Amino acid sequence: MNSRWARCLCESSLFKFRRLPEQTRSFSNSSSLRQPRLSIRESLNRWKNSGSTAGGEQSFVSQFPRPGILRPIAVAVGLGSTIYFTCLTLDSLVAAEWSFALARKNIFGERLPSEREMLAGRIKMQQAKYQARFDAFKEWTKDWPAPIAFHFQRLYVIVANSWLLSFEASQTAYKITALNTLIFLAWRIPRLRPLMNRSFLHDPLSGRSYTMLTSVFSHASLPHLFFNSMALISFAPAVFSSFFNHDRSPIERDERPPPRATSIYHFTAFFATAGIASSLLSHIVTARFRLPRLLSNLADPAKAASAVQSAGLIKPSLGASGAIYAMVVMTAFTVPHSAVNIMFIPIAIPIATAVSATVCLDVLGIIRGWQMFDHWAHLGGAAFGALYYWKGLDLWDNLRREADKDTFKLVKERRAQMVEQNKDSEDDEE
């Protein structure tokens, strides 16, 4: 038994994503592996007819290249930490900017604004921005025929008002949905298909780990995109609310929470890290359990036929389902007495019952070997949501307090410099 069988298997349909016409990149990029692709059954028949020795099965299993888990873990931790701390820093900077911009002086010193005051200030700023854009659009359309200009200006006002009246959570969900839609449309461009297969599809056997993040925003079909987008838009407000209203531990109950001007960055960090965590769990299970079991079955003549039929167990994955599972579990812990309406079911179901049922379905799917969904990614997202509710919310607040020590000092010094520069410019003008 030589390595020829391993090379044939690398190039076989075992690692194809059956929903996409293009094939994923093979595990090895060596030019020696660029041979005509064979099906699993053809590769198996060729190996059997090659006169392998009695110890060929063990040789085959030992020679097949195995994907590691240390590098994906390191990449996942690096990506997640970078996104998390970047969003944390931006959140602190925005809060500091608005705190000093809306600060009021009184006999006791300088009073920082409340979260409601900062939110009202941000809304007023958005209104002023859209009013300026409308004035510019009105000036641009002044030479159009009056009926056409009127209807376009009216459409602009309707869209702008709808956007301004929507909550911050809904605006964030719409932006993520728009990004998912753009990536979905890119899948439909044949010229971009190799790039999409390479960069927006996580294949545990490809050697690429950054796709654990990019695949979260990629969807295979229109129903896949639609249902995930509906869930994202539906549960985003509850997750935003949990960031403001979560219960604190008795030790920290008397501590003042860090000032928050927005929850956009917190939600972005939560959504991205939840997607990475769910993809990582699926990757580890595939590399350490699915693949070795499949290779052992293929090497065993008594199990080879059934293993060939179940070769689709190793497939690339994509989608935001893991991150959305984390959102649903967060909502279940935040508002446990709420009910949800599931599409095609005419009655409202308690959210605890709905979450328990979906988790049981994923566990059953793993036991039964269902291949339609990535059940391990779903369970990984659910576990991340529960862990984040118990520990992540307090961790974010504690890290924000530490970050505020530097950012508030930095913003205060910068504003003082701006005041001095304005005084100097006024003195020069006089």
Image (cartoon, helix red, strand yellow):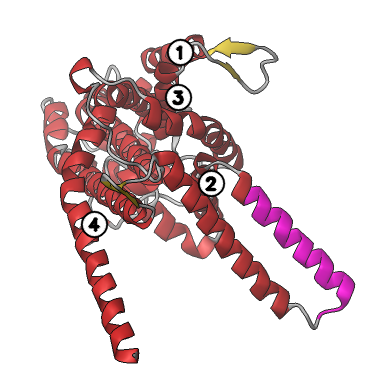
Residue 368 magenta-drawn? no
Earlier in the chain: of badge 3 and badge 1, it is 3
Q: Residues within 10 Å of mark 2 (few under 14, many from 20)?
A: some
Numbered circle sitting on residue 336: 1
| Mark 2 lies on residue | 171
Q: Are marks 2 and 1 in contact (CB under 8 Å)?
A: no
Name the residue at 16% across, 47% down: 405
Could you say which disc has been placed on residue 29 in the image? 4
Q: What residue is at 56 percent from the left and 31 percent from the top?
A: 234
Q: Which residue is mark 3?
A: 328
Helix, strand or loop under label 1: loop
Q: Residue at x 36, y 29 (%)?
A: 377
Nearer the viewer's eye, disc 3 or disc 4? 3
Looking at numbered disc 1 in the image, what kind of residue is underneath it?
Pro
Specify start and end residues of the magenta stretch as a single range: 144-163
Distance from the alpha carbon under mark 3 to that under mark 4: 39 Å
2 or 1: tag closer to the N-terminus: 2
- Look at the image and tell me in which quarter the C terminus lies: bottom left
- Of residues 52 and 177, which is closer to you in this image? 177
Q: Amino acid at mark 4?
A: Asn
| SS label for mark 3 | helix
Number of other residues with Cα within 10 Å of mark 4, as a class: few under 14, some 14 to 19, many 20 or more? few
The image quadrant that residue 8 belongs to is: top left
Q: Which mark is residue 34?
A: none
Q: Is residue 408 left or right of residue 334?
A: left
For the residues labelled 4 and 1, the Cα–Cα distance comes to 50 Å
SS at badge 2: helix
Q: Dot 4 lies on which element? A: loop
For this view, does 13 lie left or right of residue 160?
Answer: left
Give the mark, 3 or 2, whose residue is nearer the N terminus: 2
Identify which amino acid the numbered label 3 is placed on. Answer: Val
Q: Earlier in the sequence, mark 3 or mark 4?
A: 4
